[in-house]
Amino acid sequence: MHQKDGLSQPRQKSTMDIELPSGTRDTGYLELLRSRLPTALDGHEPDLVVYQAGVDVHERDLLASLKLTADGIAARDRFVFAVCEDRRIPVVLDAGRGLRPKLEDTVALHAAP
């Protein structure tokens, strides 16, 4: 899942892309995640999930244009881990990116329960 527009670097082709329009908020993001992740995992039966958990989806990110709240990001992370745990799939976490005016704000988003 990624922002459809706004970032200049070219995207690599993958087997499943979920492009989100600028301004996507918690509800739309989480609905798509909840409907697509279990199906993707069940269809591919991975031995390992590498979770790129960037916080550039936050509504106050300085570069990206998605509009998730801190609660939405925490709900995203809890869901990903719960779905993987239910299927006994180990997860490697890549904290990804995110740019806020204060580094401690970015860290807080990554560290939220």
Image (cartoon, grey):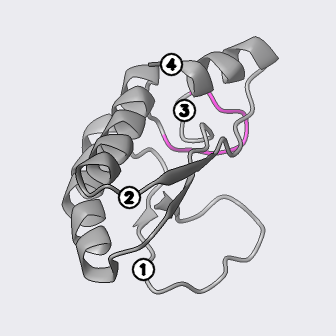
Element under disc 2: loop
Task: Specify whether residue 25 is in view.
Answer: no
Residue that label 2 marks:
89
- Vertical relation: 44 (above or below) 82: below
Q: Is residue 76 left or right of residue 10?
A: left
How many neighbours does mark 2 have within 10 angstroms: few (below 14), some (14-19), or many (20 or more)?
Answer: some
Q: Nearer the viewer, residue 16 or 95?
A: 95
- Which residue is under mark 4? 112
Q: Position of residue 73 (x, y in %)?
A: 44, 32
Q: Earlier in the sequence, mark 1 or mark 2?
A: 1
* Helix, strand or loop: magenta stretch: loop
Q: Which residues are magenta?
A: 60-66
Question: Which tag, 3 or 2, sits closer to the chain's start?
Answer: 3
Q: Which mark is residue 16?
A: 1
Sequence order check, earlier mark of 4 and 3:
3
Check disc 4 and report its element: helix, strand or loop: loop
Indicate whether 15 appears above or below 17. below
The mark nearer the N terminus, 2 or 4, is: 2
